[in-house]
Structure formats: structure tokens, C-alpha cells
Image (cartoon, rainbow, N blue to C red):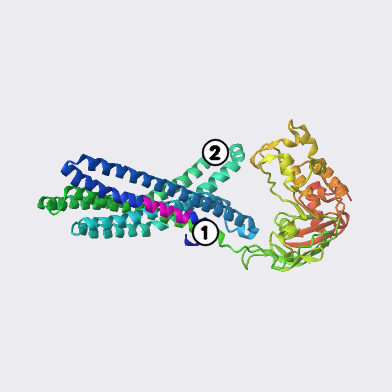
């Protein structure tokens, strides 16, 4: 938790003001029993109504001052804690945004969501409680001990037995509960993961009639979370009766020995009342400390999870002296590129890849599932870094560019189409916020999306539900293509992004791309051979290697693997395009 305290520095004024105002409230609370004792021992004993009224009004006035201090402390602590949480959440979100694909593979989406929401709420609440209760409890406890000793030092000896005992119990609870609360956050991750999968796949669950199975899976995750929470709080709850027993026994001892001293004339009734009040304040402060320390245990587990993300050194970073010259041609060159996922020892996904894509060319990437097609494309915008060799754009290694310069000149439509909540227009302009409405329509026409968009009652202002669930797969793909086109990129990557559209529409899209983006280097990852008939060059991948390179006619003549793929889709002896 200490590592995150730097986020409080900008709000140090509120951090300082909150405890100072709490000191005012504590002083008032400590004065009240003494004033009450005077009312009893002087006002009531002497039947002096004037003294009682004057002292009573003083108590009310002081109480109002204390109330102002308490309210002011709450306001200052709230501003500090909320600002702390806002800044921390913002930095954590920015950190996740800076993650490379490699970094994202180390964290599940569900755990990142939990850390951005529940974990930050835990540490934010801890800051609020620390500025209030962590200030109030020690001051009230120490002040109560001082005031109790000033009234009767012999009777105060009871405190030197009960207080250390309570502190030892508190230390035991903290030690035992920390690993349990860490486990609670992990179980919460699991619940979020199952819930997210179910909500995103609800239609598939219904189609396959797997509702009962998914309910059971969620029930298991939910039960595990509940059992872990119960186990963690069971320890806390089991200790509370022991603490209450010690407190009550201590109170009985105070009343017993105090009563003896009152009978002996060494104490007054008002003093014993004040001593009991101070004693209760001391014990109450210990109860507050125990509660907040238990909360600290849980919040500390959350703080460690947050810091784990913040401390990650992103594996793919901007160079120290980046090349910021914009891309002009869009020429792409792979020089003996080898790439593997994960640690050493894994089989490389790409092996010794070399090719050149000239500006304005349409290059298709074809191959069996798992041959490395998408991996190849992910290296161009530097979503991953090569292990060996170089990827060059316009003759410059992509690792010398800053991310903004490189990626602003690349339009990419990944395999999994992602649309954001908002309108169709907003989703297309997401690729270029400065685009005009005419640019949006032009991009949609190239992507063959204008026709179906125009049929909607609200046209381009039609809202898209989260994940684009109110659109078909083909419609989502065409909007995603328009979003990439509107960037007017030097390089356009279509990673199997026409798989959900019919062959006629796909042909129109490719034809429109060829006619309008004449200076753009276009890469098309395809599963269907019909997609690649008219491209300038086909790269045929198999097991991470280029096993064929040329146009359709050339590969049909001299490449057996290409012929095999062709025959699997069109049948043996059939020649549709040659």
C-alpha cells in the first residue's frame, strides 16, 4: 500500500487538513466526560443550577465545534480519497492501454476488470478510513489513557492489562487473515470471468441449450467466493466475542474497584463516571483499530494486485530516440523473420520469413489454420516484436518508429470484429475522428456498407448495442472495414475480415479497394481461394514458413499445396479461374 501513497501527494492539503479537523473532534470528545463529572460533583452535589446550566451550554457549544470538525474531516478525507482513487484508476487504465499483446497474455481480462473496479474501491476506502478512523482511534485511545490516568492512576492499571491483551489478539487476526483476503480477490476474479463469458456468449448458450451447465458453473464459482469470504470473516467473527469478553471484564473491574474507592472517599461519583467514559472510549478506539486493521489486510491484498499491474515493464516500448517521419510509400519488407510466442523452447510460429510488398500492391496471405497468417500481420504494426530478423516499412525497421507514427499509417481489421457502443457513424469515425460525414459515407461505400446502413430508419445515426449484437456478422465486418479505410492508411491489413460476407459482396469490396486505394499496400488474410484470384501476390504459408509465392496462375502451375487447397474448395478437375 505504501507504494501507492504517491497518488496522495497532489492532495496533500486535504490529507493534512482531515487529521487536523479530526483532532478538534477528538479533543471535544475527551473534554465531555470531564465536564460531565463537574456537573455531577459540583453542580448536582451543591445543587447549583446556574453552574449546571452554564456547564451544559458549554458542553453543547463544544459539541457543535466537534461536529464541525468531524464534518470537515469527512469532507476533506472524501475529497482526498476520491481524487486518489480517480487518479489511480486513470493510471491503471492507461497502463493497461500501453500493454503489448505479450503483456496482455499475462493477465486475464476478468482480473484486470476486478483490479480496475473492486481492488481500487478497496484501497480508496482504506484511504478514507485512514484519514478518519486511523487518526481518530489512536488519538482517542491515547487521549483517553492520559485522561484516565489523570483522574486515578491506580484504577488505570486495569488498562495496562486489557489493552496489551487486545493488541495481541489484533496482531494474531491480521497475520492469519491476510492470505485469506488475497484469496477472496482471486475468487472474485473467477466469478467475473465466468459472468463475462456468459454475458458475451448468451446467444450461443441458448442455441446449444447449455443454460443449466452454465448456471452450475457460475454457481460453483459463486459458492467458492462465498466460502472463501466466510472463511476469512469467520476468523474475524470468532475473535470478536473474545475481545468483547475482555472489554466487559475490564469494565466490571473498573466499576468494582472504582466503587470501592468511592465508598472509601478517595474518588467522587462524577470521577468514576468520567473514568468509565474514558475507559469506554479507549476500548471503543481499540475496536475501531481492530476493524480498520482487518480492512487494511484486505485492502493491502488489493493494493499488491494493483501495483503488480502498474509495475509491469511493457515488453514492447517506444525507442529512446524514435523515428517520427511519417510513412509515405507503405513498402513492407520482411528480412529472415523468426517469431515465437512465450518463452524459449516453444516452436516458432514463423520461421525465416522473407518477402517484399511494394507500395500499392495487394498481397494475400493464404494457408491452413495455424500456419501463422495472423501472426505475420501482427508484426507489421508491431503488436509483437520479432525474435530474429527485421520487419521494415519504407526501408525502416518498425522498432525504430514511435507507436503513434507507425500505427497512424496502418489500418487493420482483426479477425474478431469489435464495435463500440454508439452510432454507426461514431464507430466508423473512430478510425479518424477528424473525418467529415462525406468521408464516412465514402468509406462505407468502399466497404459495401452504405446500402444496408441507408436502409436503417436512422441511417448512420443508428445506435449500435454493446458488441454490435444488433447487427449481423457481415454488417459488423463491413463497418470495421470502413473504419480502417477512413484512416486513409499507407498500409491496410484485412485479417480474414470478409469471412462473414457472401462471395459477391466480397468481390465488390476487393474491387472497390483496388480502384480507390491505388497507393495503399493491402494485405488480405484469406481462407477462401476465391478471395485471392485477382491479387498481385499470394504468400502461401505452411507450418510457419513461406512454401509458395506468386499469383494464382503461377501457384496453380507449380505449387502442390496450393493445388490441394484449391481442390479442397472447388473439387478435383474443376478450374474456375486460371
How many numbered tags mark residues here? Answer: 2
Relative placement, left or right, of 505 versus 135 is: right
Classify mark 2: helix, strand or loop.
Answer: helix
In terms of depth relative to the viewer, which is nearer, 376 or 384? 384
For label 2, the residue is 211
Q: In the rendered image of this protein, does residue 402 appear above or below residue 498?
A: below
Q: Which residue lies furthest to the left in this view?
A: 264
- Magenta stretch: includes residue 513: no
Q: In the rendered image of this protein, does residue 93 appear above or below residue 324?
A: above
Magenta segment = 14-24
Residue at (38, 53) in percent of width and height: 23
Residue at (25, 52) in percent of width and height: 279
Single out the mark in the foreground, 1 or 2: 1
Relative placement, left or right, of 317 versus 483 is: left
In terms of depth relative to the viewer, which is nearer, 261 or 467? 261
Relative placement, left or right, of 382 versus 150 is: right
For label 1, the residue is 9
Q: In the rendered image of this protein, does residue 518 appear above or below residue 386?
A: above
Residue 483 visible to the viewer: yes
Residue 169 visible to the viewer: no
Main secondary structure along the magenta-highlighted residues: helix
Amino acid at each position: 500500500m505504501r507504494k501507492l501513497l504517491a497518488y496522495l501527494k497532489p492532495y496533500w492539503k486535504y490529507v493534512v487538513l482531515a487529521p487536523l479537523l479530526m483532532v478538534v473532534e477528538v479533543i471535544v470528545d475527551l473534554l465531555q466526560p470531564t465536564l460531565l463529572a463537574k456537573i455531577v460533583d459540583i453542580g448536582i452535589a451543591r445543587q447549583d443550577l446556574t453552574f449546571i446550566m452554564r456547564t451544559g451550554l458549554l458542553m453543547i457549544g463544544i459539541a457543535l465545534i466537534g461536529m464541525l470538525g468531524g464534518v470537515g474531516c469527512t469532507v476533506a478525507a472524501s475529497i482526498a480519497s476520491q481524487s486518489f482513487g480517480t487518479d489511480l484508476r486513470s493510471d491503471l487504465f492507461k497502463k493497461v492501454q500501453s500493454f503489448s499483446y505479450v503483456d496482455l497474455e499475462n493477465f486475464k481480462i476478468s482480473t484486470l476488470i476486478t483490479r480496475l473496479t473492486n481492488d481500487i474501491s478497496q484501497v480508496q476506502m482504506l484511504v478514507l478510513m485512514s484519514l478518519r478512523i486511523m487518526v481518530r482511534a489512536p488519538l482517542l485511545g491515547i487521549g483517553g489513557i492520559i485522561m484516565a490516568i489523570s483522574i486515578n492512576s491506580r484504577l488505570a492499571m486495569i488498562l495496562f492489562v486489557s489493552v496489551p491483551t487486545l493488541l495481541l489478539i489484533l496482531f494474531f487476526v491480521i497475520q492469519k487473515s491476510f492470505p485469506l483476503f488475497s484469496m477472496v480477490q482471486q475468487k472474485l476474479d473467477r466469478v467475473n470471468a465466468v459472468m463475462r463469458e456468459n454475458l458475451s456468449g448468451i446467444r450461443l448458450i441458448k442455441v446449444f441449450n447449455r443454460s443449466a451447465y452454465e448456471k452450475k458453473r457460475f454457481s460453483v464459482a459463486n459458492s467458492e467466493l462465498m466460502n472463501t469470504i466466510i472463511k476469512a470473516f469467520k476468523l474475524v467473527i470468532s475473535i470478536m466475542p473474545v475481545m468483547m469478553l475482555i472489554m466487559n471484564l475490564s469494565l466490571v473491574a473498573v466499576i468494582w474497584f472504582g466503587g470501592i474507592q468511592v465508598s472509601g472517599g478517595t474518588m467522587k461519583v462524577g470521577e468514576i463516571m468520567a473514568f468509565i467514559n474514558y475507559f469506554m472510549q479507549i476500548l471503543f478506539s481499540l475496536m475501531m483499530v481492530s476493524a480498520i486493521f482487518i480492512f487494511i489486510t484486505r485492502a493491502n491484498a488489493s493494493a499488491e494486485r494493483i501495483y503488480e499491474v502498474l509495475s509491469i515493464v511493457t515488453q514492447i516500448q517506444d525507442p529512446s530516440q524514435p523515428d517520427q517521419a511519417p510513412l509515405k510509400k507503405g513498402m513492407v519488407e520482411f528480412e529472415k523473420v523468426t517469431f515465437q510466442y512465450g518463452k524459449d523452447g516453444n516452436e516458432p510460429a514463423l520461421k525465416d520469413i522473407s518477402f517484399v510488398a511494394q507500395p500499392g500492391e495487394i498481397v494475400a496471405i493464404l494457408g491452413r489454420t495455424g500456419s501463422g497468417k495472423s501472426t505475420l500481420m501482427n508484426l507489421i504494426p508491431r503488436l509483437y516484436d520479432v525474435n530474429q530478423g527485421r520487419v521494415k516499412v519504407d526501408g525502416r525497421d518498425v522498432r525504430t518508429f514511435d507507436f503513434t507514427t507507425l500505427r497512424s499509417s496502418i489500418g487493420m481489421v482483426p479477425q474478431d470484429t469489435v464495435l463500440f457502443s454508439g452510432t454507426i457513424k461514431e464507430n466508423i469515425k473512430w478510425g479518424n475522428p477528424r473525418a467529415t460525414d462525406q468521408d464516412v459515407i465514402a468509406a462505407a461505400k468502399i466497404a459495401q456498407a452504405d446500402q444496408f446502413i441507408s436502409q436503417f430508419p436512422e441511417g448512420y445515426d443508428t445506435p449500435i448495442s454493446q458488441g454490435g449484437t444488433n447487427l449481423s456478422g457481415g454488417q459488423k465486418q463491413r463497418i470495421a472495414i470502413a473504419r480502417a479505410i477512413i484512416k486513409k492508411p499507407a498500409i491496410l491489413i484485412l485479417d480474414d475480415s470478409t469471412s462473414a460476407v457472401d462471395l459477391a459482396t466480397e468481390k465488390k469490396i476487393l474491387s472497390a479497394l483496388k480502384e480507390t486505394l491505388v497507393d495503399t499496400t493491402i494485405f488480405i488474410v484469406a481462407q477462401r481461394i476465391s478471395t485471392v484470384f485477382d491479387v498481385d501476390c499470394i504468400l502461401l504459408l505452411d507450418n510457419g514458413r513461406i512454401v509458395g509465392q506468386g499469383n494464382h496462375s503461377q501457384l496453380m502451375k507449380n505449387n502442390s499445396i496450393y493445388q490441394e487447397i484449391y481442390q479442397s474448395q472447388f473439387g478435383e478437375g474443376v478450374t474456375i479461374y486460371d
